[in-house]
Image (cartoon, rainbow, N blue to C red):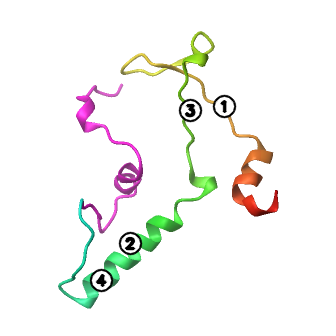
Amino acid sequence: AMDKFPPSLYIAGPRRLALLETPTTLISSDQPRTSFKSNEQREILKEASTDFINRLTVDNSFLTVFSKSFEGQTTQTEEWYGTAYNVKPVSMSALMRWKNPGEF
């Protein structure tokens, strides 16, 4: 069983992806970087950024839809907060449209 932690310790979105991958370089800043201590530092950041962007694909995505219209139609319950939800696969036709948007 997993322990409960304060909600402030849970993260979502791109930072979660970065933490799940056990990165060698973690990129986090509220301000854009305008200068670097060395070309090596610039290249490390460039490589880490490129790697992260390349992971943002349709096949490596998770779609979440929130709506009160789903109330009473859910089949699962989240273990920590008791939130009701469903998990459904995305249709192959939708995946193909997302992967090749200019072709449809």
* Image x and y of residue 33, in percent: 25, 73
Label 3 SS: loop
Q: Earlier in the sequence, mark 3 or mark 4?
A: 4
Q: Earlier in the sequence, mark 3 or mark 1?
A: 3
Quadrant of the image containing the C terminus: bottom right
Q: Earlier in the sequence, mark 2 or mark 1?
A: 2
Label 4 SS: helix
Q: Is residue 75 visible?
A: no
Q: Which residue is mark 3?
A: 65
Label 1 SS: loop
Residue 42's mark? 4
Measure the C-alpha gap from mark 2 to mark 4. Answer: 10 Å
Q: Amino acid at mark 2?
A: Ala
Q: Are marks 2 and 4 in contact (CB under 8 Å)?
A: no
Measure the C-alpha gap from mark 3 to mark 1. Answer: 11 Å
Q: Marks 3 and 1: which is nearer the front?
A: 3
